Amino acid sequence: MARLCEDFMLCGLPSGGSVRGLEPAGPDHVIVTHTDRTVTVYKVSDQKPLGSWSVKQTQAISCPAIYNSQTKEYVVVHDKKVLRIWKDEDVNLEKVFKATLLADVCRIHMLPDTEPLVLFEGGAVRRLDVLLTDPQQEIEDIVSEGEVIRWSDSVLEAGSPIVVFITEKNGAFHLYTQKLNPDMQQKFKLDSGEEIGCPVSFALSLNQEDIILTCLYSDGSIYKTELPPRRRSCVENEQALPRSSLLKLPGCKARSLQRAAIRLLDEAHIAVLGAPHSLQPTVKESLSIWNTTFQTLLTWKELPEGSCGQLWCYSGKLYVPHGKVLTVVPFTCETSSLAAVLGKLQQPNTAEMKTAFTVVNWNALLYDEEAEGLQQAAARSGAKLEPKRILRSRKSQGASTQQQSISQDQLLNQIQTGTLEKVEEDLHIFFNNLQSPNTQLITAQITTKLVHRCLEEVKFYPQKALVQLLQTQVLSYSLCPDLVAVALSKADYFLLQLCLQQFPDIPEAVTCACLKLFLSVSDSDLQDVTLDFGDVACYIDIENQSPQHTETPEVVQNGFSPGLLENSCDLPLPPVKSHQPPAFDVNSKCPVSLQKAALLNEILLSSYSETFLLPHLKDLSAPQVMLFLQYMKYLYVKYSETVNTELPGERVPTVNQVLDWISLLLDAHFTLLVMTPEARGLLTHLHKFVRSQVKFYSELSKIEGSIQGLHQVKPLSYDSRYSIEVIKLF
């Protein structure tokens, strides 16, 4: 079976929803060639760029960039003939290696442990290292005049690279194979016509020693073609390739597909983009996974903003330009069996699957087999069993379960008109019996209906139902943006905490609205609120453990010492006024309660962009800024008490996150904090504490240099004797 997991955005696409190419660039890295003038390397798991390079404004990138894992270099072609090769440390493409070729380049292909292969628009193929020895060498033309390369790919056959490309001329499609060692060329004809339309997308795979070409035609037919063995042949002796039907997509007519794509996931699964997955006319664009062995649909995801017909697959992830973003969709594929596929058909859960299917009742077969086994065991042991009663009991249990089940349409109707108790009860029953690959889509639809009724009816607020929907962990802010707005209007702190924990795409304005609500609520109002405290109690000290200050010597840990002052321990400072708190009181209590600390931690852990967050932070009032700053200062002091600057627990903000939020808050309210008398002492103490930390780490760096110098000194070798040396560091 197969499953599409929760998707996430890798980057935006300002050029209008498409990219020139996407190639792997090492583990968890991809290199994206945009349609403008930019090449960017992204770390997929962190969703952040690691490097970006651009050509001049008068230049244009003409083919996707690739990454050579052997030399750790990137290769790109601009203006069709100019090669650029650079590494990660290079900044300006104008200062990197450059080579101008005589012929126009169509594509550069990269295979594992091989030299990159350069495919020219004339059909010739050269290895990159051979090409760089003489960039001005003559390049022959293999394709005829007017023949345009529409698609190309490469594969390793017995350790030798083979480049396969498809050309078009006047509606006729041909397939070429190029093998360099030994040099072999072949040309074949691809079928096309009014009945099947023209080929739209291709995929190349290697099955043991056979090269398989999978082709999607514009009428929704997917064919598989096995390329014949490579032998020396003339390009002119072309022959038609035999093909076999692999899959027929529903809802497709002749030449109805224009921007579709396919990718082979394994021997039995194929991903299809831009083609309807069913006869349902409401869903126009979708990403689906099909089982080619049984020709069944396994899972699908709707693309409401459309796609441009581009699809890539690397390391268990599908990359789809969707709308104005590049979306990453992780997937899983498991070995399929006939029972599993029939089980899929036996459990219809969407509107398009209401047609009755005639399938084998596997449960009945299993129960009959089990009952027969019980009878045989009873006969051997002499016991008396009643298999009919057992089957009748199972039948009654199945009937009661069927009575308790509820369909999606019934639940949606109940949400619109039912009472609060009835809605929560039916929702609980529905999700207990839900077995569908489209859980995310169904959950989002139910949540949207619930939220819309909450907005229309003020007194209707199914808090338990909304919490249950969030606990499915398949929702996101983009699927139901009004959910957070309803939780803010109802001041539902537990629901807001769950949203902050599970929604990675909450806008900065909504995050600041949650922050204002958390800072403005009193601790007494949060006493009876159910929250997820996590491990907050492990490092939050609510009670003051040392009400009276005693001058006992403190052990310096990680540079933290109450006696460590800004400039020198020997120079006395003027006494601190009584209205100011002590500078670094390790036993000072937390300025907020456990409940509020748990909520504020979710804000510190949320994702944001500084550019969009900073304007909304300016809306905080002075008391709110002071309270938030005091809490973050308390956390920073707690971090400094530990040796590894970490606090216990899983969902705990790191010291870098705390410092980033402190910097943002100071940037947004610096004038206010300087002019506020209550904030001066806090800023002074925070400044002194940071200075002491910087001084401590600078001393550590000095000691590290001394220790490294000692390690570099080679000890003298003594034969049959030893010596004791005393080394004085100071």
Image (cartoon, helix red, strand yellow):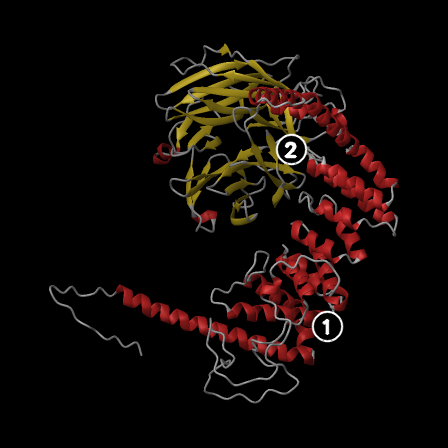
Q: Amino acid at mark 2?
A: Cys
- Between disc 1 and disc 2, the foreground one is 1
Mark 1 or mark 2, earlier in chain: 2
Res. 706 image quadrant: bottom left
Q: Is residue 191 above or below residue 275?
A: above
Q: Is residue 313 visible?
A: yes
- Find numbered disc 2 in the image and state the secondary structure of the residue it sits on: loop
Front in this rendered view, residue 536 or 31? 536
Up the image or down, 699 lies above or below 24; here it is: below
- Residue beneath disc 2: 308
Does 631 sit left or right of 689 as displayed?
right
Is the residue under label 2 in contact with that under label 1 (CB below 8 Å)?
Answer: no
Q: Quadrant of residue 661?
A: bottom right
Task: Identify the residue at horizontal 44%, vertical 26% (top origin).
Answer: 155
Identify the residue at horizontal 42%, vertical 20% (top origin): 209
**Residue drawn at point x = 58 percent, y = 19 percent:** 379
**Of residues 646 and 703, the one drawn nearer to the viewer in this rendering:** 646
Classify 143 as above or below 536: above
* Category of crowding for the residue at label 1, using alpha-carbon neighbours closer than 10 angstroms: few (below 14), some (14–19), many (at least 20): few
Compared with 729, 340 (above or below) is above
Q: Position of residue 275 (x, y in %)?
A: 67, 26
Q: Which residue is mark 1?
A: 623
Give the x, y percent position of residue 387.
67, 22
Whole-Å distance between the Cαs marked 1 and 2? 50 Å
Question: Closer to the camera, 237 or 459?
Answer: 459
**Quick one: quadrant of the C terminus?**
bottom left
Which of the image's four quarters has the N terminus? top right
Could you tell me which secondary element the residue under label 1 belongs to? helix
Q: Amino acid at mark 1?
A: Pro
